[in-house]
């Protein structure tokens, strides 16, 4: 077990290193002069030279790369080229927004997805099952930004015109200020992620449940006279949780690194929007910082998923 | 006499199953329709006499500069610059279909190649290629795609390459797993003992046996590539304006959603209908090749793009 853990963690570090190097490389292969971009169009050569020096861009690329790795190891992600704000503090500022978005959406999609999946599995081929299949395909095919726009149009604007403002978009209110306002402002972004993601979970749960419900031990449980509710929630759901957990780990890990599209559509000041801003302004340290954070989160999530697997299903041999 | 019991190959069977699936037929019809619209986009533009990039500041905008809604002249209304949304949606279909088909084809080709090579040669080559696929699958790919495009500059070709770059690994993984079991079959050994080289075995013996998987993936990767392209265009890093694409139309529409619902609804409906049709068809194709498989829509490329 320990050996497996150590190996997985080392492999995770390799991936993060690889990602960092790739992003770093990307920006130095590019025929763009970052210093000129920052100094402005009218800057003199001397100013550009100074900017270059201050950012360490005058050093040879290998030296810059080693310095870059050295700093990351010490947990220092550098400073934004544009605002000189330390990237770590940028992340600290944006992360609560993204985390609020991700955890709220995750709760919703688990409830909707697993709930509908269980109901569909207990009534296969029923009207509900068919309707759910259609709805899943519909939401699954929906690009997230379109979902966001449609929610804005129908659940915010149409209601607003009719005199109801349940879900004001934009403007993030920290949970520490007011939980109710926090939830109200995040409701549409949550829904737009959750409805799409729930589609996958619904299908996953349904498929896994149907497989499990056909097994002998379920028949045994029924023969023992257990209530249907107990069979489904205590016996079947538990053993069909594995694929759902795998998917959940991947999705949550990916989302915590920035829900780019949703944050952009709803104007939420999270990591994803920060990344897009940084990309359009070529703010290399911010881009690298966010990319490293999100790949670390993805890697960690998949590690946690594997651990959960081992706990849930003793048959999974962890080598 | 022997007409009553004729053996039907797996391909023929699959085809018959798809033909019997009502929804698949509806979806296929929708796709054909979209292709026709894309092909005849210039013709549509000629009929309504509105070029896709022409701005009708007199007739296409209200006196206060707001887009006009659907009317006789502009069936789908106009956008923020007084351009005809109908014509632009038709032209947008070209971008979406082109990117969808090419990116999906490229991913499947690369995925198949890498998967088969990894499985056939095994050993160190397999280890390297498998690790490579692991890395690609664990990249935060939307951030990464955006960074890549920001550096090299957006264009249609770049979009296709970027989408394929992030999609091939999931195909590669599945193909590798299948090829690993195929290479242990007798017919592969037989081919080998007859003196077939690696190339021949990989492409003549193994490839046809993973073809069904490749077709399923190709169909299911089309809608996700279309959505991916639209997302990049939406973020301003896909197809360069003024060339119309559904993604950049929807990006422009966000400033107008309060005054011009048609600006959101028509491009949005076109995009959704297309991805939906391909997903329905893809589901049906998969069920046709593997009727036992009961799990709809689970593709591991889907994760990051969904945020």
Image (tube, grey):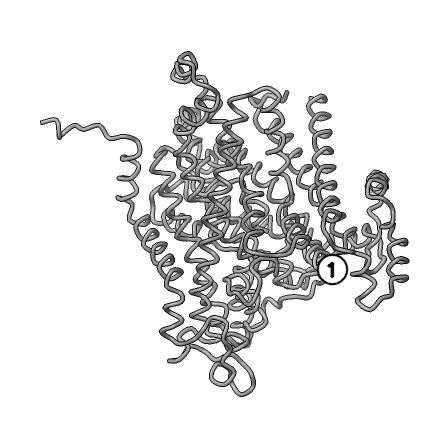
Which of the 4 image quarters holds residue A206? top left
- Up-down: is A272 above or below B13? below
The chain containing the residue under callout 1 comes to A
Q: Which corner quadrant holds the N terminus of chain B?
A: top left
For the question of whether residue B148 can be seen, the reply is: yes
Residue A101: give x, y in percent of width and height.
65, 54
Q: Secondary structure at mark 1?
A: loop
Tell whether A28 sits left or right of A58: left
For the question of whether residue A222 can be seen, the reply is: no
Pick the residue in front: A159 or B232: B232
Pick the residue in front: A281 or A77: A281
Pick the residue in front: A301 or B187: B187
State the count of labels: 1
Point out the residue furthest to the top here: B193
Point out the residue furthest to the left here: B1
Residue B190: give x, y in percent of width and height.
39, 14
Pick the residue in front: A70 or A267: A70
Residue at point 87%, 62% (across, down):
A45
- Up-down: is B94 above or below B13? below
- Up-down: is A310 above or below B162? above
Residue B250: give x, y in percent of width and height.
53, 65
Q: Residues within 10 Å of mark 1 (few under 14, many from 20)?
A: some
> Mark 1 — residue?
A281
Residue A144: give x, y in percent of width and height.
55, 56
Point out the residue furthest to the bottom here: B63
Tell whether B158 sits left or right of B26: right
- Up-down: is B57 above or below B265? below
Residue at point 50%, 72% (across, down):
B53
Tell whether A285 sits left or right of B52: right
Which of the 4 image quarters holds residue A167? bottom right
């Amino acid at each position: 077990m320990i050996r497996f853990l150590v190996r997985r963690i080392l492999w995770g570090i390799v991936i993060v290193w690889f990602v960092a190097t790739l992003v770093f490389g990307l920006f130095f292969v590019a025929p763009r002069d970052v210093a000129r971009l920052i100094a402005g169009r009218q800057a003199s050569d001397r100013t550009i030279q100074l900017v270059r020096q201050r950012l360490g861009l005058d050093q040879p690329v290998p030296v810059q790369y080693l310095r870059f790795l050295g700093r990351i190891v010490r947990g220092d992600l550098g400073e934004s080229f544009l605002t000189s704000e330390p990237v770590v503090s940028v992340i600290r500022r944006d992360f609560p927004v993204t985390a609020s978005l991700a955890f709220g959406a995750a709760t919703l999609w688990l409830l909707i997805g697993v709930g509908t999946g269980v109901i569909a599995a207990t009534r296969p081929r029923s009207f509900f099952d068919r309707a759910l299949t259609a709805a899943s395909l519909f939401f699954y095919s929906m690009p997230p930004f379109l979902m966001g726009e449609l929610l804005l149009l129908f659940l915010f604007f149409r209601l607003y015109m009719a005199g109801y403002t349940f879900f004001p978009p934009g403007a993030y209110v920290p949970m520490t200020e007011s939980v109710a306002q926090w939830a109200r402002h995040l409701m549409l972004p949550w829904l737009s992620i959750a409805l799409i993601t729930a589609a996958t979970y619904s299908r996953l749960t349904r498929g896994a449940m149907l497989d499990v419900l056909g097994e002998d031990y379920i028949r045994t449980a029924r023969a023992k006279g257990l209530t249907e509710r107990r069979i489904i929630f205590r016996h079947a759901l538990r053993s069909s949780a594995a694929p759902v957990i795998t998917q959940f780990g991947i999705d949550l890990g990916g989302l915590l690194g920035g829900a780019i599209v949703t944050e952009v559509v709803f104007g939420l000041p999270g990591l994803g929007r920060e990344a897009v801003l940084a990309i359009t302004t070529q703010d290399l340290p911010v881009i690298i910082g966010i990319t490293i954070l999100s790949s670390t989160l993805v890697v960690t999530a998949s590690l946690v998923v594997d651990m959960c697997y081992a706990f849930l299903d003793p048959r999974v041999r962890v080598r | 006499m022997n007409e009553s019991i004729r053996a039907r190959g797996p391909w023929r069977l699959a085809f018959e199953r798809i033909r019997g699936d009502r929804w698949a037929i509806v979806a296929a019809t929708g796709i054909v329709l979209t292709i026709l619209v894309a092909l005849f986009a210039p013709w549509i533009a000629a009929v309504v006499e509105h070029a896709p990039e022409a701005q009708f500041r007199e007739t296409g905008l209200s006196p206060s500069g707001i887009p006009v809604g659907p009317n006789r002249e502009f069936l789908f209304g106009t956008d923020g610059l007084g351009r005809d949304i109908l014509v632009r949606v038709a032209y947008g279909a070209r971008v979406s279909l082109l990117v969808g088909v090419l990116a999906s084809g490229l991913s499947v080709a690369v995925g198949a190649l890498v998967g088969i090579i990894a499985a056939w040669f095994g050993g160190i080559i397999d280890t390297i290629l498998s690790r490579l696929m692991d890395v690609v699958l664990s990249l935060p790919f939307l951030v990464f795609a955006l960074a890549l495009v920001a550096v090299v500059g957006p264009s249609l070709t770049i979009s296709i390459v970027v989408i394929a770059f992030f999609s091939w690994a999931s195909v590669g993984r599945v193909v590798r797993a299948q090829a690993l079991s195929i290479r242990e079959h007798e017919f592969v050994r037989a081919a080998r003992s007859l003196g077939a080289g690696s190339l021949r075995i990989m492409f003549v013996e193994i490839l046809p046996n993973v073809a069904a998987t490749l077709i399923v993936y190709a169909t299911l990767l089309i809608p996700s590539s279309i959505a991916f392209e639209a997302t990049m265009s939406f973020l301003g890093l896909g197809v360069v304006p003024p060339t119309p694409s559904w993604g950049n139309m929807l990006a422009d529409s966000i400033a107008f959603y309060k005054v011009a619902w048609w600006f959101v609804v028509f491009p949005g409906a076109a995009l959704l209908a297309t991805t939906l049709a391909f997903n329905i068809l893809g589901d049906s194709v998969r069920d046709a090749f593997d009727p036992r498989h009961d799990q709809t829509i689970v593709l591991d490329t889907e994760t990051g793009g969904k945020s």
